């Protein structure tokens, strides 16, 4: 599901997660000013931070993935004022889905060598 080069955007405001494909796609276009058919992933969460939905385009249709925590809450960073979305890395998304506070952990830098 997750390719490291995939762009991932996190909504900065809680969303009514009764919304489905069409309404979340409209939010992506209006609030994020992004194309929901671009292949990027768009993450929405509820007010109590125990559910999230991920909307993305895959080959020939929109996909909507949902996770509900039975205990606890998803950790989210402090969002900058006035921003409707923040870009996050695939590393941060993986941590978020596992319930880890990945916002405080420094991401490992990639190393590129030319010789062994």
Image: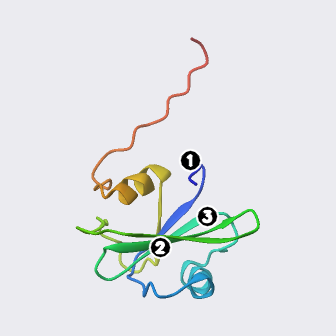
Neighbourhood count class around disc 2 (C-alpha, 10 Å): few under 14, some 14–19, many 20 upward: many
The residues bearing labels 3 and 1 have C-alpha atoms spaced at a distance of 11 Å
- Residue 92 place in picture, x, y as percent: 41, 54
Residue drawn at the location 53% of the way across and 62% of the way down: 8
Q: Which mark is residue 53?
A: 2
Task: Describe the element under mark 3 as helix, strand or loop.
Answer: loop
Left or right of 15 in this view: 30: right
Residues tagged 2 and 3 counted as in contact (Cβ below 8 A): no
The residues bearing labels 1 and 2 have C-alpha atoms spaced at a distance of 19 Å
- Residue 100 place in picture, x, y as percent: 29, 54
Task: Describe the element under mark 2 as helix, strand or loop.
Answer: strand
Task: Describe the element under mark 1 as helix, strand or loop.
Answer: loop
Of the residues under marks 3 and 1, which one precedes in the sequence?
A: 1
Mark in the foreground, 1 or 2: 2
Question: Outermost residue, left direction?
Answer: 72
Q: Which residue is mark 1?
A: 4
The quarter of the rendered structure image containing the N terminus is: bottom right
Neighbourhood count class around disc 3 (C-alpha, 10 Å): few under 14, some 14–19, many 20 upward: some
The quarter of the rendered structure image containing the C terminus is: top right
Residue drawn at the location 44% of the way across and 57% of the way down: 93
Colour scheme of the picture: rainbow
Question: Outermost residue, top direction?
Answer: 116
> Relative to the observer, which residue lies in front, 80 or 96?
96
- Residue 33 place in picture, x, y as percent: 60, 79
Of the residues under marks 2 and 3, which one precedes in the sequence?
A: 3
Q: Which mark is residue 40?
A: 3
């Amino acid at each position: 599901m997750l390719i490291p080069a995939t762009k991932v955007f996190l909504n900065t405001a809680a969303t009514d997660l009764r919304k489905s494909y069409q309404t979340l796609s409209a939010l992506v276009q209006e609030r994020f000013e992004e194309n929901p058919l671009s292949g990027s992933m768009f993450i929405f969460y509820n007010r109590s931070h125990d559910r999230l939905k991920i909307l993305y385009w895959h080959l020939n249709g929109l996909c909507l993935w949902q996770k509900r925590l039975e205990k606890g809450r998803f950790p989210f960073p402090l969002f900058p004022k006035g921003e409707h979305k923040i870009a996050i890395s695939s590393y941060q998304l993986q941590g978020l889905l596992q319930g880890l506070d990945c916002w405080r952990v420094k991401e490992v830098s990639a190393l590129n060598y030319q010789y062994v």
